[in-house]
Amino acid sequence: MASVMERFPTVSGRKVKKKTYFNGLSDLSYIGFQYSEDDLASYTGNSPLLEKIYPLPIEAMKKLDVPVLNIGPFGKDAHQWTERLDLASMTEAKNMAELAVTSILQSKD
Protein backbone atom coordinates (compact mmCIF):
# COMPACT_ATOMS: atom_id res chain seq x y z
CA MET A 1 0.00 0.00 0.00
CA ALA A 2 2.79 2.42 0.83
CA SER A 3 4.32 2.11 -2.64
CA VAL A 4 0.95 2.80 -4.27
CA MET A 5 0.45 5.87 -2.09
CA GLU A 6 3.93 7.10 -3.00
CA ARG A 7 3.52 6.50 -6.74
CA PHE A 8 -0.08 7.65 -7.25
CA PRO A 9 0.56 11.43 -6.96
CA THR A 10 3.00 11.13 -9.87
CA VAL A 11 0.35 9.39 -11.96
CA SER A 12 -2.62 11.54 -10.96
CA GLY A 13 -1.15 14.82 -9.76
CA ARG A 14 -3.17 14.45 -6.55
CA LYS A 15 -1.97 13.94 -2.99
CA VAL A 16 -3.00 10.65 -1.41
CA LYS A 17 -3.46 9.87 2.27
CA LYS A 18 -4.63 6.81 4.13
CA LYS A 19 -7.91 7.32 5.93
CA THR A 20 -9.77 4.65 7.83
CA TYR A 21 -13.40 5.65 7.52
CA PHE A 22 -15.48 2.69 6.41
CA ASN A 23 -17.39 1.74 9.52
CA GLY A 24 -19.67 -0.93 8.12
CA LEU A 25 -19.57 -4.51 7.04
CA SER A 26 -18.54 -5.22 3.45
CA ASP A 27 -17.64 -8.27 1.39
CA LEU A 28 -14.01 -7.60 2.31
CA SER A 29 -14.88 -7.98 6.00
CA TYR A 30 -15.22 -11.73 5.55
CA ILE A 31 -11.58 -12.22 4.58
CA GLY A 32 -9.88 -9.24 6.21
CA PHE A 33 -11.04 -9.33 9.81
CA GLN A 34 -9.10 -6.51 11.42
CA TYR A 35 -11.39 -5.40 14.20
CA SER A 36 -10.69 -5.06 17.90
CA GLU A 37 -12.83 -6.86 20.45
CA ASP A 38 -14.40 -3.46 21.28
CA ASP A 39 -15.34 -2.95 17.61
CA LEU A 40 -16.84 -6.42 17.49
CA ALA A 41 -18.78 -5.89 20.73
CA SER A 42 -20.12 -2.60 19.38
CA TYR A 43 -21.21 -4.21 16.12
CA THR A 44 -22.87 -7.25 17.70
CA GLY A 45 -24.46 -5.07 20.40
CA ASN A 46 -26.12 -2.99 17.70
CA SER A 47 -27.30 -6.00 15.69
CA PRO A 48 -30.05 -7.57 17.83
CA LEU A 49 -31.17 -10.02 15.13
CA LEU A 50 -27.67 -10.96 14.05
CA GLU A 51 -27.80 -14.66 14.97
CA LYS A 52 -31.50 -15.07 14.19
CA ILE A 53 -31.64 -13.78 10.63
CA TYR A 54 -27.99 -13.58 9.59
CA PRO A 55 -25.43 -15.72 11.35
CA LEU A 56 -22.05 -14.06 10.97
CA PRO A 57 -19.14 -16.58 10.98
CA ILE A 58 -16.90 -14.42 13.17
CA GLU A 59 -14.52 -17.18 14.31
CA ALA A 60 -14.02 -18.38 10.72
CA MET A 61 -13.45 -14.77 9.62
CA LYS A 62 -10.77 -14.34 12.30
CA LYS A 63 -8.95 -17.48 11.10
CA LEU A 64 -8.95 -16.43 7.44
CA ASP A 65 -7.55 -12.92 8.15
CA VAL A 66 -6.26 -11.90 4.70
CA PRO A 67 -5.02 -8.31 4.20
CA VAL A 68 -7.46 -6.23 2.14
CA LEU A 69 -7.57 -2.78 0.64
CA ASN A 70 -10.84 -1.11 -0.27
CA ILE A 71 -10.33 1.37 -3.11
CA GLY A 72 -13.40 3.20 -4.29
CA PRO A 73 -14.82 6.52 -5.41
CA PHE A 74 -16.27 9.22 -3.21
CA GLY A 75 -20.05 9.07 -3.06
CA LYS A 76 -23.12 10.14 -1.14
CA ASP A 77 -26.23 8.36 0.12
CA ALA A 78 -25.09 4.75 -0.40
CA HIS A 79 -27.92 2.31 -1.12
CA GLN A 80 -30.50 5.11 -1.33
CA TRP A 81 -32.45 6.26 -4.38
CA THR A 82 -30.40 9.47 -4.14
CA GLU A 83 -27.08 7.58 -4.29
CA ARG A 84 -24.49 9.27 -6.47
CA LEU A 85 -20.78 9.08 -7.24
CA ASP A 86 -18.24 11.77 -7.90
CA LEU A 87 -17.11 11.06 -11.49
CA ALA A 88 -13.59 12.45 -11.05
CA SER A 89 -12.97 10.28 -7.99
CA MET A 90 -14.40 7.28 -9.84
CA THR A 91 -11.73 7.66 -12.54
CA GLU A 92 -9.04 8.18 -9.91
CA ALA A 93 -10.20 5.11 -7.98
CA LYS A 94 -9.98 3.04 -11.16
CA ASN A 95 -6.46 4.30 -11.81
CA MET A 96 -5.39 3.68 -8.21
CA ALA A 97 -6.83 0.14 -8.30
CA GLU A 98 -4.89 -0.57 -11.50
CA LEU A 99 -1.71 0.78 -9.91
CA ALA A 100 -2.28 -1.29 -6.76
CA VAL A 101 -2.82 -4.52 -8.72
CA THR A 102 0.22 -3.83 -10.91
CA SER A 103 2.35 -3.12 -7.83
CA ILE A 104 1.24 -6.34 -6.15
CA LEU A 105 1.90 -8.42 -9.27
CA GLN A 106 5.35 -6.89 -9.69
CA SER A 107 6.21 -7.26 -6.00
CA LYS A 108 8.93 -9.72 -5.08
CA ASP A 109 7.41 -10.40 -1.63
Image: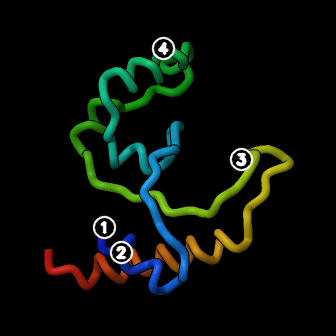
Mark identifier at residue 108: none
Under mark 3, the amino acid is: Ala
The alpha-carbon separation of the residues under discs 3 and 4 comes to 23 Å
Mark identifier at residue 78: 3
Q: Tag 2's secondary structure?
A: helix
Depth check, front residue: 99 or 56: 99
Asked if labels 2 and 1 touch by Cβ distance under 8 angstroms, the answer is yes
Task: Tell me: residue 65, above or below residue 24.
Answer: below
Tag nearer the camera, 3 or 1: 1
Tag nearer the camera, 1 or 4: 1
Under mark 1, the amino acid is: Ala
Q: Which residue is mark 4?
A: 45
Residue placed at 59% from the left, 75% from the top?
A: 92
Under mark 4, the amino acid is: Gly
Q: Which residue is mark 2?
A: 6
Q: Which residue is mark 1?
A: 2
